[in-house]
């Protein structure tokens, strides 16, 4: 009897590990798909001084104002990527123009490529850590706090504080409903994941119990 209980315990432990691995792998696959459909826009300030942080926001505002017209007709990530790459020099000129107006002679570095980021909250959305295609504007030494938004889908042009439903609609155009729910901080995906794991665990436990009952 003790031997039988030991076998049951081992089977349950193995089942739990298997189920957890299955769902965590599935969740990571969702996150990979999300990262592949996103282009981020970051502006790094020269330093964390109030003056440099204010300057960063002025550069941000001007770039967003100018790129809105460039991107308003874009319907795909490929098109947005192409527009960004073709306009790196223009974006740099826009940033330099703002610096000149503010009497600053900082260098400006504008690049488009893969950047690695930690998990970040964006309004009611949470974007997973990992590598993203990114338009990066670095002002001066770029040692200050950065500002960022999602360039594709064009959430940069949405007020995240007041227009989350609109942002969700934009995301739904390129992501599945499950992927959007993964990003929603208020949807509690860990709870959904937990419920599915418990459901499968219960089925596994009942299956094993029935098999053992037949042996008795």
Image: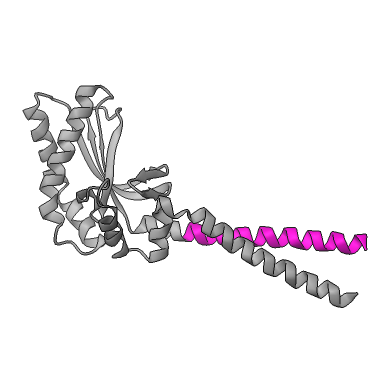
Quadrant in which the C terminus is drawn: bottom right
Quadrant in which the N terminus is drawn: bottom right
186 vs 148, left or right, is right
Q: Which residue: 24% across, 63% down? A: 76
List x then y, in percent, for residue 130. Answer: 42, 48
Residue 24 in view: no
List x then y, in percent, for residue 128. Answer: 42, 49
Q: Main secondary structure of the magenta part?
A: helix
Viewer-side residue, 211 vs 131: 211
Where 137 falls versus 166 (above or below)? Answer: above
Q: Quadrant of residue 49?
A: top left
Residue 51 in view: yes
Viewer-side residue, 177 vs 29: 177
Q: Quadrant of residue 180?
A: bottom left
Q: Which residue: 28% across, 24% down? A: 48
Residues drawn in magenta: 1-29
Q: Is residue 2 magenta?
A: yes
């Amino acid at each position: 009897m003790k031997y039988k209980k030991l076998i049951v315990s081992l089977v349950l432990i193995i089942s739990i590990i298997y189920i957890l691995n299955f769902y965590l792998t599935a969740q990571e696959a969702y996150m990979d798909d999300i990262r592949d459909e996103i282009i981020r826009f970051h502006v790094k300030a020269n330093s964390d001084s109030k003056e440099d942080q204010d300057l960063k926001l002025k550069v941000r505002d001007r770039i967003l104002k100018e790129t809105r017209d460039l991107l308003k007709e874009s319907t795909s990530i490929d098109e947005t990527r192409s527009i960004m790459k073709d306009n790196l020099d223009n974006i740099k000129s826009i940033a330099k123009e703002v610096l000149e107006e503010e009497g600053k002679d900082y260098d400006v570095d504008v690049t488009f490529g893969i950047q690695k980021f930690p998990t970040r909250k964006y309004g009611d959305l949470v974007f997973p850590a990992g590598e993203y295609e990114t338009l990066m504007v670095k002002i001066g030494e770029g040692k200050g706090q950065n500002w960022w938004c999602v360039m594709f889908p064009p959430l940069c042009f949405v007020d995240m504080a007041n227009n989350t439903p609109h942002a969700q609609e934009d995301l739904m155009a390129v992501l599945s409903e499950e992927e959007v729910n993964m990003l929603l901080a208020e949807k509690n995906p860990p709870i959904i994941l937990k419920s599915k794991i418990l459901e499968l665990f219960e089925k596994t436990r009942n299956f094993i119990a029935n098999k053992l009952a037949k042996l008795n």
